[in-house]
Image (spheres, rainbow, N blue to C red):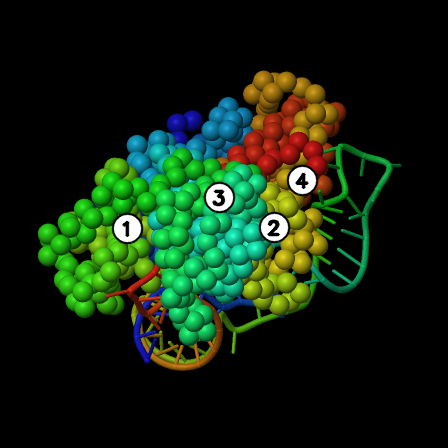
RNA sequence: GCGCUUGUAGCUCAGUGGAUAGAGUAUCGGCCUCCGAAGCCGAGGGUCGUAGGUUCGAUUCCUACCAAGCGCGCCA
């Protein structure tokens, strides 16, 4: 069979359209899978679409189309229904053919044709200033699943993590680490309230003590606090003064502390993500953009194109001319580039690397940032349509029915590691992608922990394990299944399962187009449900040899698609559980 | 105040310019001498935020309003 039933049907309809209304041949032919079984396997509203331009009664048009439909062994029944729908019921053989198709293609069933289109997906990109928390977890799960789905749909995908290793936040982490280190030598500087409070900072300080003893402790508390504004008056200025003092007092050693903290946190995050099944092809350093001069270059390019102006000593990008609500600073009065400037350079660099499509996955609180980045791209003469920003709402944690505070600086957060440890990687990955990314996610910790066995992921995994168990008891060779007489799969549930399997490639494509891996999750729930239903209603390992082979073949096909789909979501497909 | 997003069953959420709007959970009632009961079958539960508009047809698209979340720094 050269094409799937859906596209064959569409071709038949176009032929009928050519004969009934040749002047309206451009009317798009759409085929839906009706919700109700009584409406057949596919339905089209073609006649309803044609009714107005053709100025004819839709039901009359529908029957004219039916009369003009070329005969095909594919269609068992075709009828006009409702206001003017045409409902098709496929021949059983056309429905069951999917079983042999799945078994023949194996893990490639559902894979889209290679598109030679390079897509970059950038996600997580959390500041390496502390452990990843549950909010990052959602971005990680979403990004990783989306990247898998895009790759499976046929795109050439690159996964990237943008490391913010150049900014003030890293300085704050380095300072925090050093202050904790000094405390080991009784040099007590009151810890700034806006420093990083987490215990991991103390751990890093201890490591430095163990490796280098008092080497970095040649300072007094008074020196560290010299000329710093009062914390109460301005805690940010206070913090900046401490950072400046630390840099001066430590000299070249500051770089060591800074680098140590960065390396440590990056390695920790990386290990965390790897354990979560989230892999990256590239770790792109923000600092490298400065070292290679790309930031200065991007700003100079904007300047050369006449999109910058100086006001109050700072350089502004005229982003309001490109749809942003106001202009933005790219270089501060003190000469330092803003984060926005390095982000412009970063995105210009993404374009230079030749990606056909660039997907940025951001926290939804950054939505206001989109117009200025796209504006900068336009200003640089780049096509903004190639950049797509997918927003992920933060997960709001609930503990004991209360919203849990979540702040990296205060150290009050639930880490991704904790969550994974208590809920399990599979349930975690699945739970995260079980809803649309741009929807708020209420993550009830108590529920997730206490009722983790009720997570729907087990429902799907259980279906997979059940098939595996049956296959084991059947004991035959996979090759035998190719000889199954699929015509014996005539039950209502069996045909429904076949139809569901046949829909998998479409689900993959729409999930990729909509950046919506949750569609895979819902599909798998449906597939598992229909399998469980069939399993309870019919026995597979029956005495009749031919029937047994046909049913085992169907079960094996279900197992394959469950395994493929779960893999796209980064969830394991256990043989037993 | 302006902008973006969201409002669907008690709760958590899918869904779609089409036909009688779905699932999980919770509640109630059934199903293991038979391939795994982490399962299945059934029941109840809805003005799809409100009001207009476009359409043969709107829960879906448009407008206004109401409510919630987020964003409006020479922070990142």
Q: Which residue does the numbered mark 3 point to in the structure image?
A: A215
Q: CA gap, disc 4 to disc 1? A: 48 Å
Q: Which residue does the numbered mark 1 point to in the structure image?
A: A342
Q: Earlier in the sequence, mark 2 or mark 1?
A: 1
- List x then y, in percent, for residue A314: 20, 63
Q: Residue at x 64, y 54 (%)?
A: A448
Q: Is mark 1 on a helix, strand or loop?
A: helix
Q: Earlier in the sequence, mark 4 or mark 1?
A: 1
Q: Mark 2 lies on which chain?
A: A
Q: CA gap, disc 2 to disc 1? A: 33 Å
A92 left or right, relative to A8:
right
Q: CA gap, disc 3 to disc 2? A: 38 Å
Q: Residue A419 carries which label?
A: 2
**Label 2 close to label 1 by CB (< 8 Å):** no
Q: Which of marks 4 and 3 is nearer the N terminus?
A: 3
Q: Which of B57 and A211 is in front in this view?
A: A211
**Co-location on one chain, circles 3 and 2:** yes
Q: Which residue is drawn at 47% across and 57% down?
A: A220
């Amino acid at each position: 069979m050269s094409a799937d039933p859906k596209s064959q049907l569409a071709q038949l309809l176009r032929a009928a359209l050519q004969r009934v209304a040749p002047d309206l041949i451009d009317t798009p032919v759409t085929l839906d899978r009706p919700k109700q079984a009584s409406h057949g396997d596919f339905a089209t509203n073609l006649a309803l679409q044609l009714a107005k331009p053709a100025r004819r009664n839709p039901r009359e048009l529908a029957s004219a189309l039916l009369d003009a439909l070329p005969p095909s062994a594919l269609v068992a029944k075709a009828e006009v229904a409702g206001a003017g729908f045409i409902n098709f019921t496929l021949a059983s053989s056309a429905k069951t053919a999917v079983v042999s198709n799945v078994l023949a293609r194996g893990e490639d069933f559902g894979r889209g044709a290679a598109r030679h289109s390079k897509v970059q997906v950038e996600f997580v990109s959390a500041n390496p200033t502390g452990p990843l928390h549950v909010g990052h977890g959602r971005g990680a799960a979403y990004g990783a699943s989306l990247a898998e789905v895009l790759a499976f749909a046929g795109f050439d995908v690159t996964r990237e993590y943008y490391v913010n290793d150049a900014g003030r936040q890293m300085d704050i982490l380095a300072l925090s680490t050093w202050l904790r280190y000094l405390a080991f030598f009784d040099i007590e500087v009151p810890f700034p309230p806006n420093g990083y409070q987490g215990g991991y900072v103390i751990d890093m300080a201890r490591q430095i003590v163990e490796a280098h003893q008092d080497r970095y402790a040649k300072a007094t508390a008074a020196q560290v606090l010299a000329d710093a504004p009062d914390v109460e008056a301005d805690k940010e200025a206070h913090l900046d003064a401490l950072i400046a003092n630390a840099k001066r007092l430590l000299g070249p050693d500051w770089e060591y502390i800074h680098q140590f903290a960065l390396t440590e946190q990056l390695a920790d995050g990386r290990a965390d993500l790897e354990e979560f099944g989230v892999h990256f092809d590239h770790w792109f350093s923000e600092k490298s953009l400065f070292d290679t001069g790309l930031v200065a270059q991007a700003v100079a390019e904007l300047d050369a194109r006449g999109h910058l102006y100086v006001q109050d000593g700072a350089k502004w990008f005229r982003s309001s001319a490109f749809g942003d609500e106001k202009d933005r600073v790219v270089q501060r009065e003190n000469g330092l580039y803003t984060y926005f400037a390095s982000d412009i350079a970063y995105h210009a660099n993404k374009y230079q690397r030749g990606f056909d499509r660039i997907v940025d996955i951001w926290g939804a609180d950054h939505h206001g940032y989109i117009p200025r980045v796209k504006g900068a791209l336009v200003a640089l003469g780049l096509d903004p349509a190639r950049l797509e920003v997918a927003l992920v709402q933060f997960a709001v944690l609930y503990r004991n029915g209360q919203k849990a505070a979540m702040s990296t600086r205060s150290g009050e957060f639930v880490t991704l590691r904790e969550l994974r440890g208590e809920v399990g990687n599979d349930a975690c990955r699945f739970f995260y992608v079980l809803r649309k990314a741009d929807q708020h996610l209420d993550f009830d910790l108590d529920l997730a922990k206490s009722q983790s066995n009720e997570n729907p992921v087990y429902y799907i995994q259980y279906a997979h394990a059940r098939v595996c168990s049956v296959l084991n008891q059947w004991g035959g060779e996979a090759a035998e299944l190719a000889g199954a007489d699929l015509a014996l799969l005539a039950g209502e549930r069996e045909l429904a399962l076949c139809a569901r399997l046949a829909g998998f490639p479409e689900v993959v494509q729409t999930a990729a187009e909509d950046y919506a891996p949750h569609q895979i999750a819902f599909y798998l729930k449906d597939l598992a449900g229909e399998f469980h239903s069939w399993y309870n209603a019919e026995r597979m390992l029956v005495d009749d040899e031919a029937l047994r082979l046909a049913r085992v073949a169907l079960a094996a096909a279900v197992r394959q698609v469950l395994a493929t789909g779960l893999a796209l979501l980064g969830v394991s497909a256990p043989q037993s559980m």
